Image: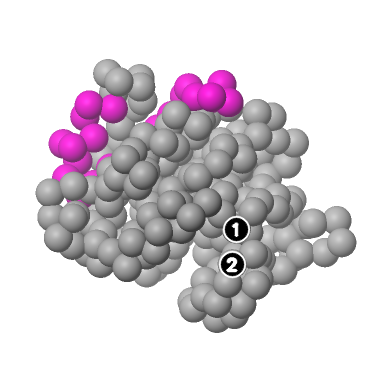
Amino acid sequence: MRAIILAAGMGTRMRPLTLNTPKSLVEVNGVPMLERQIQFLQEKGINDIIIVTGYLKEKFEYLKSKYGVMLVNNEKYDIYNNLYTMHLVKEYLPNSYVIEGDVFLNNNFLLEAPETSLYFSAKKPKFQNEWILRFDADNTVQNIEVGDGEQEFILCGVSFWSEKDGLFISQKIEDAIKSKDYIELYWDDIVKENLSKLTVHIHKINANDSYEIDSLEELQQVNESLRSL
């Protein structure tokens, strides 16, 4: 089992912090978000970790000696959405966690031996333009809707992919790249379009287990929330 961390983005909404620091290396509670992810993965015995970099790629180099991770660079980080980023590491997707680099993991909810593909998800308060999971009584994900809402289970930037599903998604990613119609696609779009051919369950976590941080305002809100816990 391994993990892929997607950390290629520019983080423009977090400037000036991200003028010299990649968004995933911005500190929350005194620790870079990405380092906390690595530490939590290693706590669960997952040491095979691939980080896809792009913007300010040189800032990630220290992680190789500190944690033994592998770095893969996306030279087109400023052109395409993250489907292309995932394409660069698609061969590692089977039996792997995928974590967005801008997610602060407050608690270590990762599983040591997931039995199926999983979307880790929490109910979040009022939100806009998020990916909402629709699932049945067996917690099998049946559909994903993108929209606004409140107290719905949404994607939190952490997932796990079984050997079978990972191989299937990898091929679909390759097909999308060959079609050359992928500039605005996210890799989760591939999952969304092929849910009927996959076995994906929702793994419910608490609202304060993870925080996706896209802006300076969200960073401030998270730091305030953590101080009150």
Q: In this rendered view, identify the residue nearer to me: 36 or 133.
A: 36
Q: x and y percent of residue 127 in the render? A: 52, 75
Question: On the rendered image, what quadrant is the N terminus found in?
Answer: top right
| The residue positioned farthest toward the right in the image shown | 137
Q: Tell me, yes or no, whether the highlighted magenta stretch contains residue 223.
A: no
Q: Tell me, yes or no, whether the highlighted magenta stretch contains residue 49.
A: yes
204 w.r.t. 1: above or below: below
Disc nearer the start of the sequence (2/1): 2
Does dot 1 land on a helix, a strand or a loop? loop
| Residue 108 tag number | none
Residue at 73% in and 41% down:
116
**Which quadrant holds residue 56?**
top left
Q: In this rendered view, identify the residue nearer to me: 19 or 177.
A: 19
Residue under numbered circle 1? 207
Q: Which residues are magenta?
A: 42-63
Q: Amino acid at mark 1?
A: Ala
Residue at 58% in and 72% down:
125
Q: x and y percent of residue 201 in the render? A: 73, 52
Q: Amino acid at mark 2?
A: Lys
How far apart are labels 2 and 1 at the CA level?
6 Å
**Which quadrant holds residue 38?**
top left
Residue at 32% in and 40% down:
30
Crowding near the residue tagged with mark 2, few <14, some 14–19, many ≥20 C-alpha atoms within 10 Å: some
Q: Marks 2 and 1: CB-CB under 8 Å?
A: yes
123 w.r.t. 115: above or below: below
Q: x and y percent of residue 9 in the render? A: 28, 55
Does dot 2 land on a helix, a strand or a loop? strand
| Residue 124 tag number | 2
